[in-house]
Image (cartoon, rainbow, N blue to C red):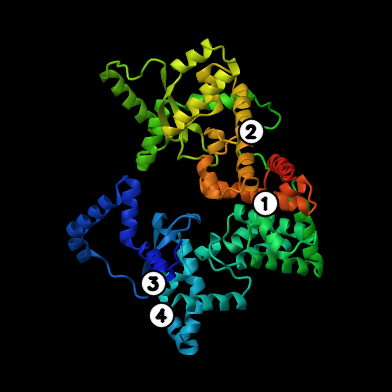
Amino acid sequence: MGTRNRPKQALERLAAKTIDAKFLHEVEHGMNCSPFEAEAVLQVVKEVYFPFINAELPLTPPGKVTLIAVSADEPSGKPVTQCEKSTVCLTLHRGIEDDRLLQQQGAVGFRRARIPDLCQEALSQGGLLTAEDLAHRVFFVSPRTITRDLTALRNAQPGQMIPLRSTVHDIGPVLTHRTEIVRLALQGKTTSQICRILHHSPDAVTNYLATFARCVHLARRDMQVGQIAFLLRRGPALVRQYLDLLAECENDRNMAYHLDELLRLGHCGGEKKAQAGGQAMGRAVDPLRKRFAPMQAKTLKNALAHRIRREFPRIGGPRIGQLCAEMILEVVGSHLRPKEHLAHGQVLWLAVAVDDPPRRHQTIAETDLVPVVLDLSTPEDVEQRLQRVAAPKRLLNKVLRLCRQAYDQGGLLSNCDLAELLANRDERISQLVCEYERQHRIVVPRRATVHDVGSGMTHKRIICYKRYAEGKPADLLARETYHSLEAVDRYLGQYDRVRHCRLEGLSPQQTAHILDCSLRLVEQYLAIDDELEAARG
């Protein structure tokens, strides 16, 4: 890994916030063009339209400046080049009022007086400014100068929220908004009041308060700052600020009361809340329907509709995508003659794409599906039957072959897929595969293991065992278990945290609450730890 070139990265982010970059983003994502094609379209537009547009452009009002900013709806975690942009028109100079301000307080006072208003003005137009925008596009100073101005503003008015992208979307090392949200909650402000004052979403406010509650819980067990930071996966600086707030509560009866209420309401025993729109309370869940109903969505029509909506996002919603898919299938069906493309014993099946891991609230109809050709019956299968190989062994061999063939073609089969293909129960298939994985410490590439879907724990056990009992490096584990390096690191990190909580004397329920995960997941990692302890002993 090379050394980060921060000046170069800053210039790249600024280059991504231009009118040309906005046009290229729209062409690439809206019309599914390649970067080369989008650049060619841009050049043609400039050559044809710019000679006429420039002559007819109205003059910008005095004191105004037009910028390209990242849209306020874009969350963190995306490169600036892939973010949606908004055009904002900001009032940089307000006339005699700012002339008087410059004369009396100089350039420093002018910047510090205008920064909050400019950020708020951009937010009202659907954009969020960054410190780099203010430095290079507005005031023409260095980012370090803007950082000093922001620090001075926060120290002078701790309660004032400056709606920068770093504060609204929790990007960068800024901690003020997090502690300020917790402080307002401890003072008795409601969630809606905090959202209105600090320009944060209710989900973000709830997340910060839950982290603070877990931090208090660990602090009251006399854990050190480093331990709390490790378990909560937060920075030590944030933990120290939360502990300072906890110390303030001891001397303020109002804050102490609201802290007790926050801890009482926030401790949920480690169980996840039911998802919105999920199973109605009191209605029994049909386990068979829950497992096999998604297979009804694995159709060619749904695969076509999903591809149409992804490649042509402006064509319409899901209903339009389904109608387009039906029209395509109707035309194809009326023109094609039946033709045999498969060998004897083979079957064509739709599998979930390996490179499309599940997302929250994602359904099978919204998932990339790939057609795979599987050897359902081979001469070897017949030979095993003639050799009187036990039925469970023959079934396992077929399962292993089908899973690996699908993976080699870029697809993943689920236990329900295998149950339909082999006319067997999915519970039986899961039992055979899990037992095989335990005995051989090998991960079979299924959707449950590669995409971490369902309640299985075999792949977690294998990954942890290979790392801590056999001493294999993480990159080798990723190749051996058909997982990404990030997934392997996530499993190992979670195991370390669960083990750390056990060594500190926390119960499974307390561990689930602190780590913000389900009790079942904690119990799985504790079982893995017991197995590793037995191997070490």
Please, what secondary structure does the residue beneath circle 3 have? helix
Residue at 51 percent of width and 78 percent of height: 113
Task: Please tell me which residue is depicted at 71% across the width and 29% down the height of the picture.
Answer: 282
Residue position for label 2: 438
The residue indicated by pointer 1 is: 496
Instruction: First in sequence, mark 4 or 2: give its number.
Output: 4
Reading the chain from its start, which is encountered first: label 1 or label 2? 2
Q: Amino acid at mark 3?
A: Arg
Give the mark nearer the N terminus: 3 vs 2: 3
Q: Which residue lies under the disc numbered 4? A: 95
Residue 390 lies, with reference to residue 230, above or below; the image says above
Q: Are marks 3 and 2 in contact (CB under 8 Å)?
A: no
Mark 1 vs mark 2, foreground winner is: 2
Q: Position of residue 251 (x, y in %)?
A: 81, 70
Name the residue nearer the viewer: 19 or 458.
458
Task: Locate residue 289, reporting x and y percent.
Answer: 59, 23
Q: Which mark is residue 137?
A: 3
Q: Nearer the viewer, mark 3 or mark 2?
A: 2
Residue located at (31% from left, 55% from top): 24
Q: Residues within 10 Å of mark 3 (few under 14, many from 20)?
A: some
Q: Amino acid at mark 1?
A: Asp
Q: Nearer the viewer, mark 1 or mark 3?
A: 1
Q: Residue at x 41, y 66 (%)?
A: 9
Does residue 366 sit above or below 141 in this rendering? above
Q: Amino acid at mark 4?
A: Gly
Residue 244's tag is: none
Kindly state the secondary structure of the residue where label 1 is placed: helix
